Amino acid sequence: MRQGRFERKTKETEISVEVNLDGTGKADIRSPIGFLNHMLELFSFFSKVDLTLKAAGDVNVDFHHTVEDIGICIGEAVARALSDKAGIHRFGHAVTPMDEALSQVVIDISGRPFLVYRPVSLPEKIGEMDSELFEVFFQAFAFRSQLTLHVNMLYGDNGHHIIESCFKGLGRALRQSVKVIANEIPSTKGVL
Ligand SMILES: [Mn+2]
């Protein structure tokens, strides 16, 4: 089992994360941000990554610190679980509809952190969460887990649907990319 744990406490947030890349999609998500909890449960279900998250933060300020630090902590736990990345498929992609919305999410577990984020027009808030925080989450996750992540929203009208398609797509793409299919490290350089 490829498992990773990470705990982090700052003056702004206190977060603990456990992941199991070889799980069944069992989620135990506890943060003060309801919409993000909903998205992370979907991510876990579609990635089949077991995800336990306990997060507290200074949400009386706004959700920024908590969202960013949750992204950092999940990213670090995934990086630890991947270890030397031996045998993984490395690449994953998903084009995911949610009713009228469609998004494309592409992952390369490259060791080169990068985010390409192409949003469509979103309402200012989804649930109680500022829409600008989704980019913050994806950036924090991609950089800490050292993967290349493209989140390309294609179209949609309903903000909840658009973002939900992205998180389902993140799960589907991650599931493919972490799958073990060989023995060697999947790079012509021999290192990822
Ligand atoms: Mn929903």
Image (tube, rainbow, N blue to C red):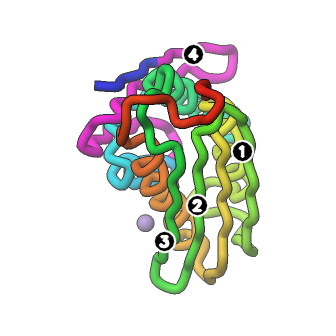
Identify the residue under disc 4.
Answer: 8
Distance, label 4 to label 1, CA atoms, is 18 Å
Q: Earlier in the sequence, mark 4 or mark 2?
A: 4
**The quarter of the picture showing ligand 1:** bottom left
Q: Are marks 4 and 2 in contact (CB under 8 Å)?
A: no
Q: Amino acid at mark 4?
A: Arg
Distance, label 4 to label 2, CA atoms, is 28 Å
Residue at x 36%, y 23% (from the top left corner):
3
Residue 42, position in %: x, y?
39, 55
Identify the residue under disc 2.
Answer: 105
Q: Amino acid at mark 2?
A: Val
Residue 74, position in %: x, y?
52, 32
Quadrant of residue 22 within the rendered picture:
top left
Identify the residue under disc 3.
Answer: 96
Task: Give residue 136's mark.
Answer: 1
- Under circle 1, the secondary element is helix
Q: Is residue 107 above or below residue 32?
A: below
Q: Amino acid at mark 3?
A: Thr
For label 3, the crowd category at 10 Å Cα-Cα, with few meaning under 14, some 14 to 19 and many 20 or more, is: many
Q: Earlier in the sequence, mark 3 or mark 2?
A: 3
- The answer to whether mark 2 is within 8 Å of ligand 1 is no
Q: Does 1 sit left or right of 109 as displayed? A: left
- Under circle 2, the secondary element is strand
From the image, state whether disc 3 or disc 4 is nearer to you: 3
In the image, the segment drawn in magenta is 6-33
- The answer to whether mark 1 is within 8 Å of ligand 1 is no
- Under circle 3, the secondary element is strand
- Under circle 4, the secondary element is strand
Q: Is residue 58 visible?
A: no
